[in-house]
Structures are given as structure tokens and as C-alpha cells.
Image (cartoon, rainbow, N blue to C red):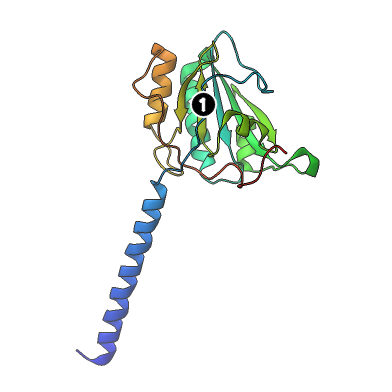
Amino acid sequence: MCPRLRMRTLCAVMWFACSGVAIWALTAYSFTPAAPSPVLKTWPVETALVRNSNRYTALLFLQPHCPCSRASLMEATHLIEELGVNVQWVAVLQQPSAATGDRITTSITALAGAVPGLSTYSDAGSVEAHRFGATISGELLLFDPQGKLCFHGGLTGGRGHEGVSVGSLAVRDWIRRGSATKVTCNVYGCRLYSTGEGPQ
């Protein structure tokens, strides 16, 4: 083999090896869940969010800048269309502290505001996220009409992956049957807020 051909072959092998490592890294990241914190087991009386005492209430916490939020929002949209009026859905969108006077507007906030049956709440300073214990974008908390936490987890099977998941199936079971084998599952998304952010 001539030196030039040998060099081309070596370069090709190195390119394929680097590509394989990159693909493996991206795949591993996509299916690596975030580490959520413990959440409240009952609806907090201090919250500004309103719970429906006649049906389930689902809170979907979203970080507007997180690319994974879109998939969570789309899965919530499918559940809203399927389950109808049996659930009160609220997208809790993280926003800077009211003291800054800033407001985040992204494609995620626009999409959330356009989903029929989904109300939105601007969580300035992540006050409600801290209050409920939510830390990851895409984290869903499902409460029964009495204010008891039934399910806590994500609606996707990976970061940015749409489609049926353990979480979406569990939510369906809770709403349709009043029980489910799963009360929690992995959440795939970015952190809702940086360490140190929150109510002062």
C-alpha cells in the first residue's frame, strides 16, 4: 500500500471512530435522566396556583429555553386531547424574578399559550417550582381532587423524544382508572433554574 493510500485509510478509520464516539455520547445523553428532588406529597396551601376540587390537576413545569421542553409539551397536548375535561392542565413556565422586569418569550411559551385546554402560569423567580419541589423541565405533578399527589415524573422516554412513554401511560391510567402501577418515573430535561436561584 502506497503512503498516500495508507494515510487516506488511516484518516477514514479515525473519522469513523470519532463519529461513532460522538453518536454514542449523544445517544447516552439523550437517555440519561435528570436527578429530580423530592416533591410535596400534598397540594401546598401557600401556592398561588389554583387546584380543581372536582377533577385531577396536572402541573407541567417547563424551562422556556430547554430544547427538551417541546417534546414534553407535545406529549401533554396529546394527553389533553385524549383525556379531555377530566384534568385541569397548567404549564408552569419559569421566568426571571419580577424585580428584574424581564420576561422570557420563546417558541415554547408561544406553543404553550396556543394549546387548547392548557392554561399557563408565569413563575417569576421560580417561586412555585421551589414551593412544589420541581427542579427539572418536563417534570409533571398530578394531584387528585383532594390535593394528594398521585404521580410525579416525566412524559417522555428521553431528552426531546416524543411518543408513548412510561409517564404518559401512568397518567392515562390514573385518570381513567384512578390508579396506576407507576407513581413516579424518570424525567428527561434541563434544570428549571440555576443553583442559588429562587425566592429570597
Tell me the residue at 38%/58% (across/down): 25
Q: Is residue 23 above or below residue 17?
A: above
Residue 132 sits in quarter: top right
Residue 114 sits in quarter: top right
Q: Residue furthest bottom?
A: 2
Q: Which class describes the residues within 10 Å of circle 1: few (<14), some (14-19), or many (20+)? A: many
Tell me the residue at 34%/57% (across/down): 24
Q: Is residue 158 above or below residue 60?
A: below
Tell me the residue at 63%/35% (across/down): 93
Tell me the residue at 34%/63% (across/down): 21
Expressed as whole percent of the image width and height from the top left, the position of residue 73 reads 53, 34
Q: Nearer the viewer, residue 12 or 157?
A: 157
> Can residue 103 be seen in the rendering of this structure?
yes
Task: Tell me: 149 left or right of 125.
Answer: left
Expressed as whole percent of the image width and height from the top left, the position of residue 66 reads 56, 45
Residue 54 sits in quarter: top right
> Can residue 101 be seen in the rendering of this structure?
no
Q: Residue furthest left?
A: 1
Task: Tell me: 19 left or right of 100.
Answer: left
Disc 1 marks a residue whose amino acid type is Leu
Q: Which residue is mark 1?
A: 141
**Quadrant of the image for the C terminus?**
top right
Expressed as whole percent of the image width and height from the top left, the position of residue 176 reads 41, 13
Q: Nearer the viewer, residue 35 or 65?
A: 35
**Quadrant of the image for the N terminus?**
bottom left
SS of the residue at dot 1?
Answer: strand
Expressed as whole percent of the image width and height from the top left, the position of residue 34 reads 46, 43
